[in-house]
Amino acid sequence: PKPQEMSPSLQEMSLSPPNPLTSSSVSSPARLVRSMSALRSTTWGVDLQQYSKQVELELQEVERASIHDYIKESENIASLHNQITACDAILERMEQMLSAFQCDLSSISSEIRTLQEQSVAMNLRLKNRRAVREQLGQLLDELVVPAVMISTILEAPVTEPEFLEQLQELNGKINSVKEQAFRETVACADVQHVLEKLKIKAVTKIREFVLQKIYSFRKPMTNYQIPQNALLKYRFFYQFLLGNERTVAQELREQYVDTMSKIYLSYFKSYTSRLMKIQYEEVAEKDDLMGVEDTPSLKNRNTVFTLGNRGSVIGAAELEGPIIVPHAAQKSDVRYPFESLFRSQHYALLDNSCREYLFLCDFFMVTGPSAQDLFNAVMGKTLTMFLKHMEAYVCDCYDSIAIFLCIHIVLRFKAIMAKRNIPAVDKYWDTLLDILWPRFKHILELNIQSIQSTDPQKLGFLDTRPHYITRRYAEFSSAIVSINQTFPNEKTHALLGQLQVEVENFVLRVAAEFSSRKEQLIFLINNYDMMLGVLMRRERGRREEGARKERGRSEEGERTERGRREAGRGEERGFGKRREKVKGRRRE
């Protein structure tokens, strides 16, 4: 029933607290007593029987209404029941499907694990196969002899680039087969006989080619630098022979050494003999000393004690200048002092020695002591011939200035070769200095002895003018000092000091022959003034020469800078003209 239709007591009951009798705790006596007391307090003043009947009627009415509602909604309930049944069937099928999926997933996970294991195994096999393939491929590349290599080695000329390329490949395969044979690789036996035949053919062709080049050196009037440069292009040939056929390499080396040794000896022997034919015919003799009276003035040569222009032979321009051509000098009837001939001879030796040493190191692949031994085998006879020639000439030479200039030429050439980092001829330079220094010292000692042995009383008539001995000493000492400036040497200073002491003693002895003190002083002043004048003139000339060279360098630098500026202005003018043309085109 609706709330407004309920009795007031029932409405009041519905608004009151719940009935304690409906509690689940009725079974407890204490709780029952408390519920009864609560009921009495609640229903105080109400008839309980009437109230219970009313409640019963209301409950029946509610039951009938509920049954009526159920009957009214029976179709919906039946539909709901059918839907629930259908949902149960669907859920059952879904359960079966999910169970099948679960089984499938279990099988799939096991298959994935199997595939993963198979993938790991396949990756490992692939890695191993790649490693094997790499090593096996490299082995095959090293062992397999291609047809191109065979045809090129057998048929192509040795000067062709293809031959050199295939020869390098052949050398690599030979070395690889040797290495694999040491490891007892069975496949090496299949290619060894092929490689051996190719090696023999290549060695034969290379031997013929190199011997032909070496024999071409022997032709008259041959510039041997040309075949040397040709051999340097094929330096790998000797490397191939050295690694595969040492007997042939040794044969070619001996042939080259024998050929070039004879060529150098013949060339320098002929050149030296022709050079000596254009030397001054009249040279200083053993009587041309400071203390010997009336030293003759020889024709077509400088004086014995004066430097003159002879010092230019150690200048930068002439020291490394072109060598003297003997037949051209003979045709023009030109003569030279010994130091110029010495310079030309040894500059040719220096130039050829540097080139030969570098060729030997490059082509024959030698360094250090081995290179020095090979160079000595090629140039040893020539250097021995030079030393014998110098010993024969120097032992009869009394031109101290020429000897001293030769010493400084050797010192400068030695410095040039040190700058080029070529030690091939160092021992020869030292031996040459050991020949020249004692001779220079001996000649100065002869001059000192000649001054010591000069008796002023036997000089005849004396006057207060400078004596010819002091003039000779002044010229000679100034010459030696000017030469010795670049490479000062204590030996030279000591010898000049001894000579100076003897000249001073001689001047004092001659001055003592004058009767008056005035004449003695005049004689001393004139001689010392003359000596100082010669020395100062030489020093002034040296300074002027240095200033002239400096001016020349500065003028050259100015010309270079001027040319650079003019070139820049020309370029600017050119750019200006091009800009004007562009502007004109734009206006058009």
Image: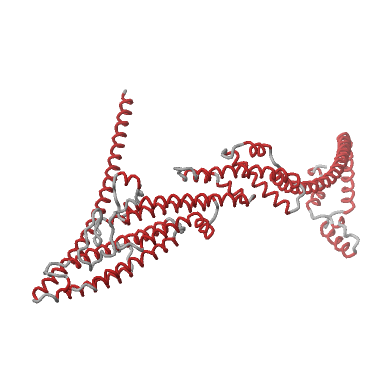
Nearer to the camera, 186 or 574: 186
Give the quarter of the image for residue 519. Answer: bottom left
In the image, 234 versus 446, the foreground residue is: 446
The chosen color scheme is secondary structure
> As displayed, is residue 521 above or below residue 107?
below
Determine the image quadrant of residue 234.
top right
**Whole-percent x, y for residue 284 in the image:** 28, 60
Residue extending farthest top: 588
- Classify the position of the N terminus by image quarter: top right
Q: Residue at x 90, y 64 (%)?
A: 29
**Picture coordinates of residue 347, whole percent (x, y):** 38, 53
The answer to which quarter of the image holds residue 455 is bottom left
Quadrant holding the C terminus: top left
Q: Residue at x 55, y 42 (%)?
A: 212
Residue 297: x and y, percent? 21, 58
Residue at point 63% right, 37% down? 152
Left or right of 360, for residue 416: left
Q: Nearer the viewer, residue 404 or 100?
A: 404
89 versus 9 height, above or below: above
Q: Is residue 231 left or right of residue 45?
A: left
- Residue 307 place in picture, x, y as percent: 25, 59
Q: Is residue 512 left or right of residue 248?
A: left
Please give the count of numbered marks on the rendered protein. Answer: 0
| Residue 296 falls left or right of residue 32 | left
